[in-house]
Amino acid sequence: MLMLVKRSERQLSKKVMVRLEWAEVEAGIRAESEISEAAREIGRKFRPIHPKIAIDDVEKGFLEIKPEYSRDAPTEALPATIILKTPRREATRQLIVILAKSFDFDIILLSCLEPKIRSEDFLDQLDIASRQFLRDAAMTLVFGLGWRSMVANLVVESRIGPSFGPSSVVEKILGK
């Protein structure tokens, strides 16, 4: 699609072209930009606004996040702030096993949400960036800052090793 646009074989709106140019400038692909300061402001508006998660957040066991919702979501009825909490230790052990079998990260996110908003319907109302950030934040709260390595090990193990045998990553995580 991008190549069609670059070769002028596909036309995009001016707004989309401005955003595309801004993204190229931000990525360092385009050294100088012809876009106006107003266009730069549009780019800044769409820059991720979520904070980085630190070890202190993991140790506290909760995060307070201001999500963005999709355009068609009834934002007046949705919380302005979401609190993610680390589940109880026993629940965390069960989540490890579920994750190892399903690789469904939304289950981890749902387990960290408050019961009144713990539903897939709620998740469907989040914009894509907020949902991904919340999913990553939940994974970090439950499994720590190195959760991506853990998931990679689970993937490799499930493909080449015995099906979660005694030396599995799951057993190591559970301390068995």
Image (cartoon, rainbow, N blue to C red):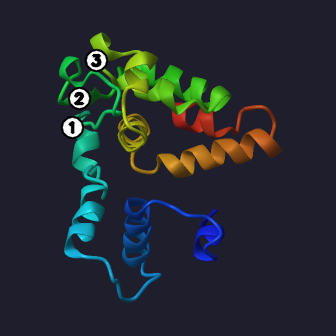
Tell me which residue sits at (35%, 25%) in the image.
Answer: 112
Q: Is residue 164 above or below residue 74?
A: below
In this view, the residue in front, 20 or 51, is: 20
- Say which label, 2 or 1, has the lower sequence index: 1
Amino acid on which the number 3 mark rests in the picture: Glu
Q: Are marks 2 and 1 in contact (CB under 8 Å)?
A: yes
Tell me which residue sits at (29%, 49%) in the image.
Answer: 53
Q: CA distance from mark 3 to mark 2?
A: 8 Å
Of the 4 image quadrants, the one containing the C terminus is: top right
**Residue 82 image label:** 2
Q: Which residue is mark 1?
A: 66
Tell me which residue sits at (31%, 77%) in the image.
Answer: 35
Amino acid on which the number 1 mark rests in the picture: Lys
Q: Is residue 126 left or right of residue 103?
A: left
Q: Which residue is mark 3?
A: 114
Of the 4 image quadrants, the one containing the N terminus is: bottom right
Q: CA distance from mark 1 to mark 3?
A: 14 Å
Q: Is residue 149 left or right of residue 67?
A: right
